[in-house]
Image (cartoon, helix red, strand yellow):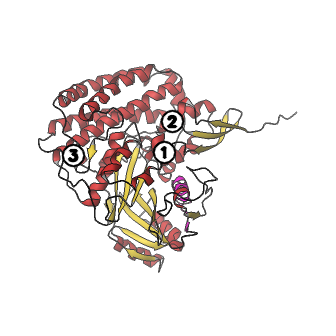
């Protein structure tokens, strides 16, 4: 007798704890094995690109906070670079250094969340995550010092920062930078050789190099696939050409490599922070820019290496006080193009792990 | 540093391979006719020395008289970039050939532009709305929507 089996359809999400937001996957299963997947997005679509068209250039900055809400500072940064490029505005040295310091702290914070939640996805709920929250909390405190906010900072301005850092900021960051390598060792002790983590992540969810490139995948996922591509090195924006750091890459392109790349990137961010704090010059933190900015007619595309990948802003100006078009190239959105390639052939229990390893934030996917 | 290729040089090279497709040239961008977009994109991706292997972004811009679709391309191998643009004049039914068969990353990007800007990408394997629901009327990112 031949057993007849039918594919089963499972709708995972939008309210599923592993999706870190409102993401829905339509999974087609053969027994336990995934045969097809369709990502469904849009549950958090707020029309930020449309909203930006009705606001002045400065008023768009708080909107960018709401894209990748685990990396608000880098969102601010990408946007202000685009406007500065559009209107040819020079940024003071000190502001550039402050941006690097803040941006690298943000990267550490975002990677802490990504690696911590990986533990949650594996079922070792909250122990690794709370270790990482301990350090993330300190970074949140730094950001609270500089701008009074803990999630949506709205700290950067066109031509600099909204205000200079308070005097207690630098000593606190120095202490953090000195301690952080020890904490990263601690995470690695807890996770890197952990038998459960190895069994669940090694060789799982492989994304080959060519597929990653043609699917426009960027950020740690691309680097874990063995491509040495980091905009801080390949197209240095701001002052990244002044710092020494390495680009960690993976070899197997699996979930474990993505985890390792993020851990190593945190170590590199510490290196950049050390250099930036040492070189930080005195001076103004903001150049004089008219409040109602009217950039000349034209267009500009600026991109930065946000914690999730290439975050770009394509701005078109018609000479008025509001952007004519503000197109946001969100790394999380393009990274899920490759989700299907990573998932098909794996068991449904791995779906959560593989999906989590891409590290998407729905605020950025849906905009 | 990513080198932004000169639009002029590239236009000459394209002109030799695919004549009469380039409409206008700017410093680092070229605008081509929409019917020739796929051929030009294929040329940019496959010609040795150019090899634009990654499609970074697709943006649609509504200029009311016409739509402009902007492709940001980068070559990871040679670390250079170019902005490829195309124009569609038909406001009621703007059509642009899809580049999904060249860069799979275009899949979601084209669906997004279709959803919010109403530009149809001919040859896309699954051209449906991505953010808004299927019964939604209109395309909100068009300038005359509100």
Q: Position of residue B137 (x, y in %)?
A: 60, 57
The residue that mark 3 highlights is A96
Give the SS element for disc 1: helix
Q: Quadrant of the N terminus of chain A?
A: top right
Q: Is disc 2 in the same subunit as disc 1?
A: yes
Q: Position of residue A24 (x, y in %)?
A: 59, 39
Q: Is disc 3 in the same subunit as disc 1?
A: yes
The disc, 3 or 2, on the residue closer to the chain's N-terminal end is 2
Question: What segment is highlighted magenta in the picture?
Answer: B94-114
The residue that mark 1 highlights is A365
Residue at 43% from the left image edge and 22% from the top image edge: A128
Residue A21: assigned label: 2
Q: Residue furthest bottom?
A: B20
Q: Position of residue B93 (x, y in %)?
A: 58, 69
Cα–Cα gap, marks 3 and 1? 28 Å
- Asked if marks 3 and 1 touch (Cβ < 8 Å), the reply is no
Residue at 59% from the left image edge and 35% from the top image edge: A13
Give the SS element for disc 2: loop
Give the SS element for disc 3: helix
């Amino acid at each position: 007798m031949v057993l007849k089996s039918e594919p089963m359809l499972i709708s995972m999400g939008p309210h599923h704890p592993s999706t870190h937001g409102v993401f829905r996957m339509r999974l087609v299963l053969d027994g336990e094995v995934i045969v097809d997947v369709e990502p469904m997005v849009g549950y958090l679509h707020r029309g930020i690109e449309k909203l930006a068209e009705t606001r002045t250039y400065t008023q768009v900055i708080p909107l960018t906070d709401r894209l990748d809400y685990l990396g608000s500072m880098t969102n601010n940064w990408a946007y202000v670079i685009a406007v500065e490029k559009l209107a040819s505005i020079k940024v003071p040295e000190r502001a550039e250094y402050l941006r690097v310091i803040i941006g690298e702290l943000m990267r550490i914070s975002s990677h802490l969340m990504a690696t911590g939640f990986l533990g949650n996805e594996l079922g070792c709920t909250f122990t690794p995550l709370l270790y990482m929250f301990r350090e993330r909390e300190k970074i949140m405190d730094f950001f609270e010092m500089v701008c009074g906010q803990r999630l949506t900072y709205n700290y950067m301005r066109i031509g600099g920062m909204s205000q200079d850092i308070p005097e207690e900021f630098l000593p606190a960051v120095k202490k953090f930078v000195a301690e952080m390598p020890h904490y990263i060792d601690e995470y690695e002790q807890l996770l890197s050789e952990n038998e459960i983590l190895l069994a669940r992540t090694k060789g799982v969810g492989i994304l080959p190099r060519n597929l990653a490139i043609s699917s426009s995948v960027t950020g740690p996922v691309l680097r874990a696939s063995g491509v040495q591509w980091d905009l801080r090195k390949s197209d240095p924006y701001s002052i990244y050409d002044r710092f020494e750091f390495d680009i960690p890459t993976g070899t197997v392109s699996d979930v474990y490599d993505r985890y390792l790349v993020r851990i190593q990137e945190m170590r590199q961010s510490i290196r950049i922070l050390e250099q930036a704090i040492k070189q930080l010059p005195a001076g103004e933190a903001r150049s004089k820019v008219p409040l109602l900015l009217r950039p000349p007619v034209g267009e500009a595309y600026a991109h930065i290496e946000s914690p999730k990948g290439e975050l770009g802003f394509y701005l078109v100006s018609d000479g008025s006080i509001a952007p004519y078009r503000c197109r946001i190239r969100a790394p999380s959105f393009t990274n899920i193009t490759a989700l299907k390639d990573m998932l098909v052939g794996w068991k449904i229990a791995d779906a959560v792990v593989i999906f989590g390893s891409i590290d998407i934030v729905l605020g950025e996917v849906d905009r | 540093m990513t080198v932004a290729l000169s639009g002029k040089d590239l236009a000459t090279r394209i002109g030799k391979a695919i004549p009469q497709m380039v409409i206008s040239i700017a410093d680092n961008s070229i605008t081509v006719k929409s019917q020739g977009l796929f051929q030009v994109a294929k040329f940019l991706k496959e010609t040795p020395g150019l090899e634009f292997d990654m499609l970074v972004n697709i943006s649609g811009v509504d200029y009311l008289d016409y739509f402009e679709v902007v492709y940001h391309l980068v070559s990871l191998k040679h670390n250079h970039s170019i902005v490829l643009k195309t124009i569609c004049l038909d406001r009621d039914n703007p059509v642009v050939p899809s580049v999904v068969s060249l860069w799979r990353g275009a899949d979601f990007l084209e669906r997004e532009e279709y959803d919010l800007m109403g530009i149809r990408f001919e040859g896309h394997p699954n051209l449906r709305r991505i953010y808004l629901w299927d019964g939604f009327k209109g395309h909100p990112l068009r300038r005359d929507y509100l």
